[in-house]
Amino acid sequence: MTRFSTRKQLGAVIGAVVLVGAGGWVAGSQVHSPADAAAAHSAPKAVPVTVAVQRQSLTATVVSTGAVEFDSPEPLSLAGAVGTGTAATAGGEGAEQRVTKAPVSGAQVKEGDVLMTVNGRPVLALQGAVPMYRAMGPGMSGDDVKQLQKALVRLGFEPGGVTGTFGQGTAAAVTGWYTHKGYQAQQPSPDEQQQLGTLQQSVSAAQEALLTTTAAGAGSTHPAPKTGTARSTDSGTADSGGSGDDGGSPSPESSTDKKVRAIQLTSAKKSLDMANAALSTFQASYGTKVPAGEAVFFPKLPVRLDKVTVKAGDVPSGQIGTVTSSDLVVQAVVPGSDAQLLRKGMAVDLTTTEGEKAHGTVAALGADAAPPTPQDGADHGASAGTTEQGAGSETGEDGGEAADPSGSSSSAPVQLRISVPEPGPMAGQAGASVKVTIKIGDSDGKVLTVPLAAVRTSADGKARVQVLRGGNARDVRVTVGLSASGLVEVKPDGTALKQGDAVVVGQ
């Protein structure tokens, strides 16, 4: 028993010694001197960051974001009153102007269509370069009358020739056109009818005055007494030679009376001439008219009603809406430095947010591409994009005229308009955003390329890249070519640079 206990105690002592030794070893391994700690936390030695030179084809592009819009937006307004005036009449004609049927946004308008109605009367669409600026009626002449006559011919209502003068044939054609549309052409107003009656009465009064003056002059002479000598009669009595009221001849007027009568006759004739002239002038313009507000001339038809700013019951003053063509365009904005690389006629790839593709053409740049401002100042949603090309890029080989940023700085944004002859997936997507990609040029086959960050310009203005070989860096002079997608074409002097070489892009 005593020997067994002794062995047991000896094993416990040995185990304790082993544990203490192990703990000391662990503790010792965790203890470092200040020098060791500083060395452990020091930064590793800097080494250059390199990228391998590659041989590949490059395509330079300008990329932006654009907004799909309808082309040629123009403000829509009426040139004057619809009907004959602003004073209300018993029949309601010429009452205060109120929209009775508003234009419909999105509708396509063709020649001869009714855009809207005001006080129950139509506002009709016609094609012509001269804007409506006055009422047209009998006796009027001008280019606006001529284009009205041309429009009537196209609509199938013959005005009796395209003369530029509004005659009875034009009036009849206008009447037929209105009737065909379900309306009555504008006839003389009550005021005009009253004025015609007044002028006719003036003519009648002047005629009566002339007749009275003429008749008074004819009967103005009176008989003079006889002045013959006395003579004997068979009875021996003397005859005085005179006669009673039924004898003798009338005596002539005095010179003063003649002058008065002549003046009266001349005045009466002049009054009649003036009355006839006033009646003729008024009758020349009396009859069927096209009021200033009942026709709107558009340079090109059909058009699309893009925005409408009036509703039934409104007074149609000022701008009542916006019209556009049915063609789609894309409005975008690019930095001025990118715009200098673009030319009219360049092909454009368009990508919708769903990834669908369409194609367009650069139609205008700069001021020529700016959307018209009169309509409503709407934000067209075009935003400046990024350009996948860099300094030293070469332009493409298209022969068009480069964009002119109008003397602004190279970074100033420039407006860009892209025509889309075949919108495809963009049809009906006005207001949508699309990605705009314009190819500037291609490299001549496969070329040596390096990242833009690898190219440095030395004090002598020459471009260089730094090649790392065997741990040693060497500068190689290069000529910079086309750039795209962060890469740039480089042409080394001689054979100092080849595919697979490591060029330094940073430390």
Image (spheres, rainbow, N blue to C red):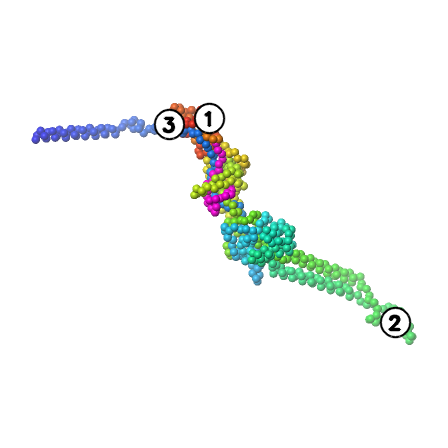
In the rendered image, the residue lying farthest to the left is: 1
- Residue at point 89% right, 69% down? 229
Mark 3 vs mark 2: give the one in front. 3
Q: Position of residue 381 (x, y in %)?
A: 47, 44
Q: Amino acid at mark 3?
A: Val
Give the CA separation, mark 1 to mark 3: 25 Å
- Residue at point 59% right, 53% down? 156
- Residue 428 seen: yes
Mark 1 vs mark 3: give the one in front. 1
The C terminus - image quarter: top left
Q: Position of residue 465 (x, y in %)?
A: 44, 27
Q: Amino acid at mark 2?
A: Ser
Callout 2: SS: loop
Circle on res. 240: 2
Q: Position of residue 383 (x, y in %)?
A: 47, 41
Give the CA separation, mark 1 to mark 2: 152 Å
Q: Earlier in the sequence, mark 1 or mark 2?
A: 2
- Residue at point 64% right, 53% down? 160
Q: Where 314 sits versus 457, above or below?
A: below
- Residue 144 seen: no
- Residue at point 71% right, 60% down? 272
Please give the range of residues in magenta: 417-443
Instruction: Give yes or no for contact between labels 1 and 3 (Cβ–Cβ under 8 Å).
Output: no
Q: Position of residue 379 (x, y in %)?
A: 48, 45
Can you identify the residue that label 3 sits on? 47
Asked if the stretch drawn in magenta spans residue 437, the answer is yes
Callout 3: SS: loop
Can you identify the residue that label 1 sits on? 492
Q: Amino acid at mark 1?
A: Pro
